[in-house]
Image (cartoon, coloured by chain):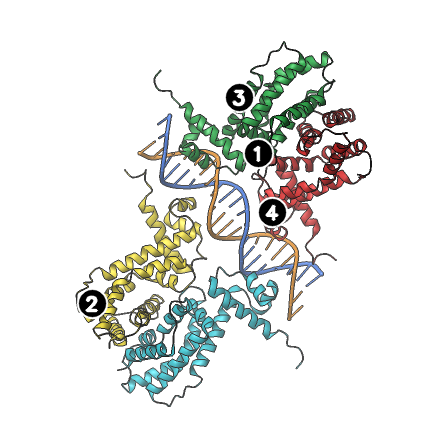
Chain colours: A green, B red, C yellow, D cyan, E orange, F blue
Amino acid sequence: MGKLQKSIDKRNALVKATIELVNNNGFHATPMSKIAKMADVSPATIYLYFENKQDLVNQTYMDIKAEYTNFAFATHNPNTPVKEGFENIWKRIAEFKLKDCENAMFLAQCDNTPMIDESIRQKGIKHLQPLLDLWERGRNEQVIKPVSDYLLYAYAINPLSFLMISQKRGALQLSKKHIEEAYQAAWDSIKL
Amino acid sequence: MGKLQKSIDKRNALVKATIELVNNNGFHATPMSKIAKMADVSPATIYLYFENKQDLVNQTYMDIKAEYTNFAFATHNPNTPVKEGFENIWKRIAEFKLKDCENAMFLAQCDNTPMIDESIRQKGIKHLQPLLDLWERGRNEQVIKPVSDYLLYAYAINPLSFLMISQKRGALQLSKKHIEEAYQAAWDSIKL
Amino acid sequence: MGKLQKSIDKRNALVKATIELVNNNGFHATPMSKIAKMADVSPATIYLYFENKQDLVNQTYMDIKAEYTNFAFATHNPNTPVKEGFENIWKRIAEFKLKDCENAMFLAQCDNTPMIDESIRQKGIKHLQPLLDLWERGRNEQVIKPVSDYLLYAYAINPLSFLMISQKRGALQLSKKHIEEAYQAAWDSIKL
Amino acid sequence: MGKLQKSIDKRNALVKATIELVNNNGFHATPMSKIAKMADVSPATIYLYFENKQDLVNQTYMDIKAEYTNFAFATHNPNTPVKEGFENIWKRIAEFKLKDCENAMFLAQCDNTPMIDESIRQKGIKHLQPLLDLWERGRNEQVIKPVSDYLLYAYAINPLSFLMISQKRGALQLSKKHIEEAYQAAWDSIKL
DNA sequence: CATGAATGAGGATTCATTCAT
DNA sequence: TATGAATGAATCCTCATTCAT
């Protein structure tokens, strides 16, 4: 099919470079020139693929967020029992966060700083719908505590970010056993 | 009376301005000039109180961290039963994070970005010792799960940051009842 | 034609502006912004050609030093008799210093202040080798006093800098006759 | 006689600090605050003794220039024969420049840069009158070449500055023998 | 006379973005 | 499409000088 107008490879290289550099230095301490250099393109080329720096980060965020939720729900079956469904999703998320650490770090940084546009963050939340649906079912079936999604997320999912960051900083090394313990804590905190 | 000494008021105003501006814009998007303006001093004056921008943020972090843990453990009695002791500390922390929201936001941003020097962060961790001691006791008494401090922190304490940020963003409003639910989730996740 | 390469013209304009401004105001009283303005480029452009201000001055020094010694030794023949060889070199140097006054002023300022890096100055000294070789031969042939190169330089060459500066300051106007007198003094001071 | 309004000690300490710092860093790289610190006074105190930075350096220059010429001519007798008189003055100057190196360095820096006001420099020249008188006599008695004072100074006196700076930079160590050689070169260059 | 605090003006440098090719 | 050069606008920080005490 001839030559693609724009090279998806270059776009990917730029997104990848952005993740790595922002992870290590933060958004504002990451110059476009460095991103370009790491992606092996000219600074001017970035503007062929992205409107500006903010757009580059926004898109990077959305890319990863999609990848994250895709992975999380890839094996999810809306018909399985709540507990089983939750364990499956939780472990997929854990796998993503701990194995695909760079990406997860980036999301964590985005979610805890005024780095990306609020509207973009809102969009990202929608991807979680399958999990919210599961919880709704769980509450109805009186398997899960009758509390808000925020609370469930705060206790069941968010702690993984903390563990992931701690591991990245070398504070601890998460073994299979730790993951199992973490899952237990997650489930204990939300189960009825 | 007072004008021959470096004014603690000015230092405090600078720290306060730093917190507010960094919360809203992030470290690198917060110019020294704006901090100065908000604190109602000349930019040059900042350098009488702090070595440079990094030092300003480091010191701000340590200030708040100390305030945070002081508040958290102010009413702590090392001899109370583990469950009671934990509930007390947890609720103090919750009170701090939700009432003293600006400060808590700042800490969250520091803890999730490469914003402050790692050595400073390390120092900040030490302040948590009373909580770690309590957990150690809880594990010995088989009241708390025999898992690492990181795991306990991730599930018992860290979710509060998520809830606090969500509230700050207007996503939810935490009532007394929510706090109680959150406490229950926290305790459920770590209790044996 | 040419706009895809860093322009040697711009570099030269920057070097030239540096010389003029530093001559008149000294290193630290010469802002980069003024250099840029005089060279008709943006301040940021300087940093495409030079690492920083110090590098700009260092390179300017080396440029001129090379030009200076190239000119001085351009007509030098290592086989001519010592006296004749010296007279030739001396007069070339005199010509350079008095006609190419701006450059010579710059060198003088560099050599009498802590303005350029010592390592750069050291490099500059090496260019004088042909003159030192001549003197070595002169000493061997007992035409020149058996004293150190420093002494010979101090008396035979350096006075030209003083005369050049004095002329630049308008204290005197050096005619052909003065040059001849100066040459005589130079030779008298070092000949055996 | 009671308390002097201003302490001459403080003024001297300031002048001394100025010399040392300007020698090592240059005029513009020497902040008033550092001068104050080295002189062990407050920055504000400098302004009790000097109008501003320029005035401080100007006065420092004049102080040293006076000290220099006082020393040079202290043992000078206008009636001694020219050659003897010159040797005496030359050796006093050499002694000053090589032993009182800091001061001489400062003068050299002033004389080769746009550091001090031209009017001040002019004043400093007048102090050399006894030497100029001696040369005038020497020319009349046909002991000294019939050339301008500038030329005589350039060859007879100025080389000492070069040697002094070279020694300060560690390039050479001037022994008694070197001084004698230098004197000989100086005399050879100007004698008839 | 002496000071430490305070500051406005200025300087080196960086960087997101544009433009000519 | 792709680029390297170019830049104006910012940003951190310094410093001569002043001022209240």
Q: SS of the residue at dot 1? A: helix
Q: Label 1: chain?
A: A
Q: SS of the residue at dot 2? A: helix
Q: Which dot marks residue B55? A: 4
- Alpha carbon distance from label 1 to label 3: 20 Å
Q: Is residue C169 left or right of residue C190?
A: right
The mark lying in front, picked from 1 and 2, is 1
Residue on which the image places disc 2: C85
**Other-residue count near label 3 (Cα within 10 Å), few / some / many at <14 / 14–19 / ≥20:** few
Q: SS of the residue at dot 3? A: helix
The mark lying in front, picked from 3 and 2, is 3
Q: SS of the residue at dot 4? A: helix
Residue furthest bottom in the image? D79
Residue on which the image places disc 3: A67
Q: Which amino acid is tagged 3?
A: Glu
- Alpha carbon distance from label 4 to label 1: 24 Å
**Is there a contact, CB below 8 Å, between mark 1 and mark 3?**
no
Residue on which the image places disc 1: A168
Residue at (43% x, 61% y) in the render? C114
The mark lying in front, picked from 1 and 3, is 1
Q: Give the number of marks.
A: 4
The mark lying in front, picked from 3 and 4, is 3
Q: Quadrant of residue A113?
A: top right
Residue at (39% x, 56% y) in the render? C21
**Other-residue count near label 1 (Cα within 10 Å), few / some / many at <14 / 14–19 / ≥20:** some
User: Does residue D90 lie above or below B135 as drawn?
Assistant: below
- Alpha carbon distance from label 3 to label 2: 79 Å
Q: Which amino acid is tagged 1?
A: Lys
Q: Label 3: chain?
A: A
Q: Which amino acid is tagged 2?
A: Gly
Q: Earlier in the sequence, mark 1 or mark 3?
A: 3
